[in-house]
Amino acid sequence: MNSEPPEEPGEPRPPAEHGTPIGRRVLLGTIGLGALGVVAAPVLQRGLEGFLGAAADKDPTGLTGLLPNGGGFRYYSVTSSVPHKDATDYRLTVDGLVDRPTTYTLDELRALPQTRLVKDVQCVTGWRVPDTPFEGVRLSRLLDAAGVRAKAGAVRFTCFDGAYSESLTLEQARRSDVLVALRMQDKDIGHAHGGPVRLYVAPMYFYKSAKWLSGITVTEDVKPGYWERLGYDVDAWVGKSNGRDDDPTS
Ligand SMILES: Nc1nc2c(c(=O)[nH]1)N[C@H]1C(S)=C(S)[C@@H](COP(=O)(O)O)O[C@H]1N2
Ligand SMILES: [Mo]
């Protein structure tokens, strides 16, 4: 019997452990791939992404988080299950220190001008995926539409997984390479990648790009997000934070 506690689902090691040469994750990754071979056949029709999403929904150890998820991406979730949402029930709320709090449906977001960016994605644990298209509405547009009040200084993001959160300063949030993304890899964002809507913060480590985005709240000060309370940098510029020297992504 395995008496080890299950690993927390989602992002693996806190920064303090970044130097560890051979992690348990490497081992688990190998086992995970073996397991995929055993169970892959019956689920081929659903596609790898669908399988990963479904498997992760049932796997509280986060083991499935280690499986390569099409094109080099890895599935991350800090919760063991995430509700599925689509155009019928998805809502994005913009509130906080704004003059006009607003709730958008998916169709309303689709009707706004879309911006497409193609850049590398860099995870703080080391993996990088080159030239990935993301497409959606500039966050600055939604902030302007809501009318940000003078004393506001930051934006907090919440997710319909019920657990994850992120934040940006208002200046960061207004950059033209920060999107409320509806498409990734030139497809509507599937559930496993945080669909139907995720944040995309091009110049920062991918933990900033909150999946299953449901809330944008304008605040006075930055409130550190989920991983930031556990040690990751709040200002997560690729190559200039978290003790890493990756090439910039934007
Ligand atoms: N809601 C939510 N968003 C999240 C995460 C998460 O666990 N939950 N993980 C973050 C991390 S650490 C990474 S690397 C990316 C992974 O995105 P992917 O699963 O599409 O590869 O999502 C980010 N956004
Ligand atoms: Mo990550």
Image: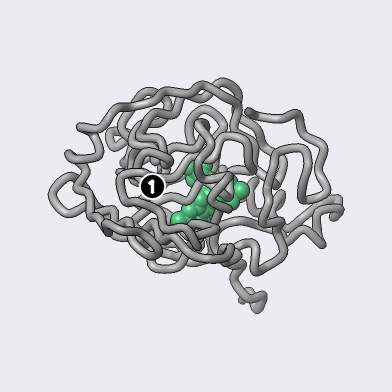
The residue carrying mark 1 is 143
Q: Is residue 197 left or right of residue 157?
A: left
The residue under the point 81% across, 54% down is 18
92 vs 51, nearest the viewer: 92
Q: Quadrant of the N terminus?
A: bottom right
Q: Is residue 46 left or right of residue 178?
A: left
How many other residues sit within 10 Å of disc 1, few (<14), some (14-19) or many (≥20)?
many
Percent position of residue 105, x then y: 19, 47
- What colour scheme governs how the chains and residues are painted in the rendered image of this protein? one colour
The residue at 37%/38% (across/down) is 141
- The total of numbered circles placed on residues is 1
Residue situated in front as seen by the camera: 125 or 30:
125
| Of residues 63 and 129, the one drawn nearer to the viewer in this rendering | 129
Q: Quadrant of residue 96?
A: bottom left
Indicate the secondary structure of the residue bearing disc 1: helix
Q: Is residue 66 visible?
A: no
Looking at this view, name the residue that lies furthest to the front.
150
Q: Residue at x 44, y 60 (%)?
A: 218
Any part of residue 217 in sight: yes
Task: Name above or below for residue 62 compared with residue 123.
Answer: below
Image quadrant for the C terminus? top right
x then y, percent, for residue 91: 23, 54
* Kind of residue at badge 1: Leu
Q: Position of residue 57 (x, y in %)?
A: 38, 59
Percent across and percent down for residue 211 are 43, 50
* Viewer-proximal residue among 40 and 103: 103
Give the residue displayed 77% in from the left and 47% down from the top: 241
Query: Horizontal placement of 89 versus 149: left or right?
Result: left
